[in-house]
Image (cartoon, grey):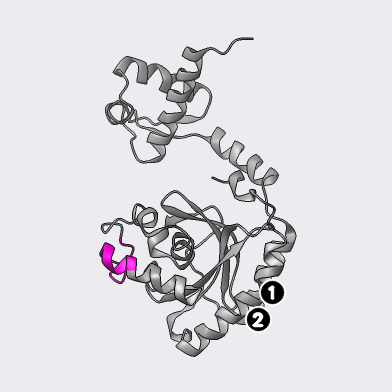
Amino acid sequence: MEANPAGARTLERGLSLLDHVAAGAHRLEDITLASGLSRSATHRMLTTLVAGRYLSQQPDHSYHLGIKLLELGTKAEAKISLSDAVQSILADIAKTTLDATHLGILSGDDVLYLAKARGHRGIEMASRPGARHRAQNTAMGKVLLAQLSNDEALKAFDAAAMDTPRSIQDAGSFRAILDRIRANGYALDDQEHELGITCVAIAVPDLLGKIAAAISVAAPSVYMTPERIESLVALLQDVQPELSRCLPPGFERAWI
């Protein structure tokens, strides 16, 4: 059967409307402007998406993501998962260090958190599996951006994308930090993403040796002395080979 280019374009446009709503466009006029479609075409597609429960329409006529996406997301999460061994490794590190441990990958300009083991200090952090945060403000994101050339990494840098007053504020400083990460083999986020929290991360290759992910330990900054950071880097480097054996080539494509 021959492909239907018109049908494919309609599907692409409909899916793009979901992205626009997810990005914060909720009024018909705003969604129309973001999509570049005519008002009538946008309204027609939105009506279809509401009927399919991919979107919901509120009494004030605003559009929001629908329950169908949550249902699909739950099913996808059940099918696309890291091995139990990965979670076990993170849990062991968290038990040893008492601090939260994460595994993440680079997705565009963001770091996408895939797994987390909670710490044991009674302090809950904002991080969670499935969350995305600007890569430049996180240790995992910076260590993964450091695997790229400076030109490529700087494309992901935005001086306005500050999470805290301690976030990196200019491209020159960011470039210097990337060079330091490459020289040291690890990255730090010293309250750049969350005030009061310091995070250290190293890159992790997959089973064939290609850098595919990052692992981090995050703790209240009062516990992150230079000596402890050095010991945490050594610990992460020790578990890196074991973790790599759990990451099949191309595993990250399931999430990107």
In depth, the one of 122 and 80 nearer the eye is: 80
Which segment did they paint magenta? 162-175
| Residue 35, horizontal then vertical, whole percent | 33, 27
Q: Residue at x 34, y 34 (%)?
A: 26
Of helix, strand and loop, which one carries label 1? helix
In depth, the one of 70 and 242 nearer the eye is: 242
In depth, the one of 67 and 87 nearer the eye is: 87
Q: Are marks 1 and 2 in contact (CB under 8 Å)?
A: yes
Quarter of the image for the C terminus: give it: top right
Q: How many marks?
A: 2
Amino acid carrying label 1: it is Asp
Q: Is residue 171 magenta?
A: yes
Of helix, strand and loop, which one carries label 2? helix
In depth, the one of 205 and 86 nearer the eye is: 205
Disc number placed over residue 223 in the picture, else none: none
How dense is the environment of label 1, judged by Cα within 10 Å: few (below 14), some, or many (20 and up)? Answer: few
Instruction: Residue lying at the far bottom in this picture: please name it.
Output: 227
- Residue 23: tell me if it is visible: yes
Q: Is residue 150 left or right of residue 2?
A: left
Amino acid carrying label 2: it is Thr
Rendered position, 154 above or below 185: above
Disc number placed over residue 92 in the picture, else none: 1
- Structural distance between the alpha carbons of marks 1 and 2: 6 Å
Tell me where residue 175 sits by quadrant: bottom left
Rendered position, 99 above or below 60: below
Q: Is residue 218 magenta?
A: no
The secondary structure making up most of the magenta span is loop
| Residue 178, horizontal then vertical, whole percent | 39, 67
Quarter of the image for the N terminus: give it: top right
Q: Residue at x 46, y 70 (%)?
A: 182
Disc number placed over residue 96 in the picture, else none: 2
Rendered position, 71 above or below 80: above
